[in-house]
Image (cartoon, rainbow, N blue to C red):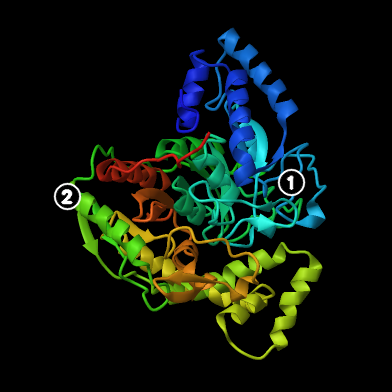
């Protein structure tokens, strides 16, 4: 069994059928991490002793033949923005370097209840607020495909760990591409669920102990297959315990799909060139994917987005930035509030001011967002899914020395600001839709490319089914990075 490429679901089956013990699997993962992780710095906090005890206990339960949870005995890691009982949780912040929560975040508790064993935490940028992964607590995480390049952010450590075979499953979070961008850069699968179906309680930011689930932000899995995304979603989705008496989550899986014949697929690869141009290298992969799907029988139409990218980005900025700002320490928040008196109207200034935005601005943006959501709903009357780029380029060289507002990405010789480069994720994520990121194969330079597969609100199960048949029809699957131990 190749632990570097096998799925979490397959590992759980092997444990149930006693083909491998939880202890054996944990030791294999720890040994692999000892060889591979030093070059990557993906896993940054460890809980080895308790994990070994939990694995031994899991094996005892396995031997009894009792009913087992869906992830019984499967070791895994989670992003360091999720509170973990008894294990340090920093969100990349020096002021939280010694913070050890007394309780698990909701998603962590639900994963444990399904039998998962958490043996470590993966790296995140400071307060999950960057599209690269580095911080003053743990340092920088490197891409397993090329250590001189970024893993993306903010779930960069999570995606790198999955790609490098250090963990079979991860849980990230996404408010501006933080699952989708690392999945694209590292060649793995990621799910940004519909907003509100997976509780974010116990996630930092907000501040430690926050009881508020923020707008736009979601918790979602990162894995090496769509099947594992579906497995993980089924374990963590649903109301908070105190709300369970009043509502249930019953997502419609839609009709059974065996192939892509007849699926109505919209591609928007040619849209938004004035806002977020796509490199020729990435565009070639996306066009090839669309052609393969058409050859397999899907109806593939190149169309315009129902909401212009620039409009979507404006709304995302005015809603998401205040959410992020609310979780910041007072001294950092004050720096953003001071931008109100700084002259100018550059995108960086606008975003900075939005971190300390007034409530009225958020309400106005929310009204605009509802109009955009209605436009998307009408659009999905014509199409089953939309395929969109994740980022304009493949993983770019590390750029962590300059302030975020000064950073650019080279798109075929054009310097594109980081915020503009993330427009495809921000503008499309702000309307709360479920999005699956799947690999499309390697670029001409040998680096992974991904695509956003977008579906209607609350169509998560059907979208996952469609994403699975799209990947099968296009012949794309997880490819391990080279030279992993």
Q: Residues within 10 Å of mark 1 (few under 14, many from 20)?
A: many
What mark, if any, has residue 89 been given in the picture? 1
Q: Quadrant of residue 103?
A: top right
Q: Position of residue 195 (x, y in %)?
A: 52, 54
What mark, if any, has residue 286 been given in the picture? none
Q: Quadrant of residue 161?
A: top right
Residue 116: tell me if it is visible: no
Residue 451: tell me if it is visible: yes
Residue at x-position 62% and y-position 28%: 31
Q: Is residue 285 left or right of residue 348?
A: left
Mark closest to the chain's N terminus, 2 or 1: 1
Q: Position of residue 457 (x, y in %)?
A: 42, 55
Is residue 21 or residue 265 the one in the foreground?
21
User: Disc 2 designates what residue?
Assistant: 295
Q: Position of residue 351 (x, y in %)?
A: 60, 76
Q: Is residue 462 left or right of residue 202?
A: left
Is residue 414 or residue 372 the one in the foreground?
414
Q: Position of residue 97 (x, y in %)?
A: 80, 50
Secondary structure under tag 1 reads loop
- Of all residues, the one furthest to the bottom in this rendering is 343
Residue at x-position 51% and y-position 17%: 16
Q: Is residue 16 left or right of residue 358?
A: left
């Amino acid at each position: 069994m190749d632990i570097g490429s096998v799925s979490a679901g397959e590992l759980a089956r092997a444990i149930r059928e006693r083909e491998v013990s939880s202890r054996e699997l944990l030791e294999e993962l720890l040994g692999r991490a000892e060889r591979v992780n030093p070059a990557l710095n993906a896993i940054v906090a460890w809980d080895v002793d308790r994990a070994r005890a939990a694995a031994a206990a899991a094996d005892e339960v396995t031997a009894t033949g009792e009913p087992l949870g869906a992830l019984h005995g499967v070791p895994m890691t989670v992003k360091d923005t999720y509170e973990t009982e008894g294990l340090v949780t920093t969100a990349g912040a020096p002021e939280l370097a010694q913070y050890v929560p007394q309780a698990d975040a909701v998603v962590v508790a639900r994963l444990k209840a399904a039998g998962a064993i958490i043996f470590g935490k993966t790296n995140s940028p400071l307060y999950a607020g960057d599209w690269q992964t580095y911080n003053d607590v743990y340092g920088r995480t490197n891409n397993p495909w090329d250590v001189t390049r970024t893993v993306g952010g903010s779930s960069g450590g999570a995606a790198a760990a999955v790609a490098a075979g250090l963990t079979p499953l991860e849980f990230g979070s996404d408010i501006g591409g933080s699952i989708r961008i690392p999945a694209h850069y590292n060649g793995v699968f990621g799910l940004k669920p519909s907003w509100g179906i997976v509780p974010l309680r116990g996630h930092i930011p907000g501040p430690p102990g926050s009881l508020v689930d923020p707008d736009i932000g979601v918790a979602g899995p990162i894995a090496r297959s769509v099947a594992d995304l579906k497995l993980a979603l089924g374990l963590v989705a649903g109301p908070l315990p105190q709300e369970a008496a009043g509502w249930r989550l019953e997502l419609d899986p839609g009709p059974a799909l065996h192939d892509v014949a007849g699926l109505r697929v919209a591609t928007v690869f040619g849209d938004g060139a004035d806002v977020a141009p796509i490199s020729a290298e990435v565009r070639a992969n996306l066009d090839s994917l669309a052609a393969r799907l058409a050859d397999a029988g899907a109806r593939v139409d190149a169309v315009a987005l129902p909401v212009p990218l620039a409009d979507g980005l404006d709304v995302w900025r005015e809603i998401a930035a205040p959410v992020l700002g609310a979780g910041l320490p007072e001294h950092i928040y004050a720096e953003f509030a001071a931008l109100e008196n700084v002259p100018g109207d550059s995108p960086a200034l606008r975003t900075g001011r939005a971190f300390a935005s007034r409530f009225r601005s958020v309400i106005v943006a929310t009204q605009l967002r509802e109009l955009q959501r209605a436009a998307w709903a009408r659009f999905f009357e014509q199409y089953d899914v939309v395929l969109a780029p994740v980022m304009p380029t493949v993983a770019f060289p590390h750029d962590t020395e300059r302030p975020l507002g000064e950073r650019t990405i080279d798109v075929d010789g054009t310097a594109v600001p980081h915020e503009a480069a993330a427009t495809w994720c921000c503008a499309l994520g702000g309307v709360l839709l479920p999005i699956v990121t799947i690999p499309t194969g390697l670029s001409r330079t040998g680096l992974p490319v991904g695509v956003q597969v977008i579906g209607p609100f609350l169509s998560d199960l059907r979208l996952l089914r469609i994403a699975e048949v799209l990947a099968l029809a296009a012949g794309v699957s997880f490819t391990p990075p080279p030279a992993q131990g």
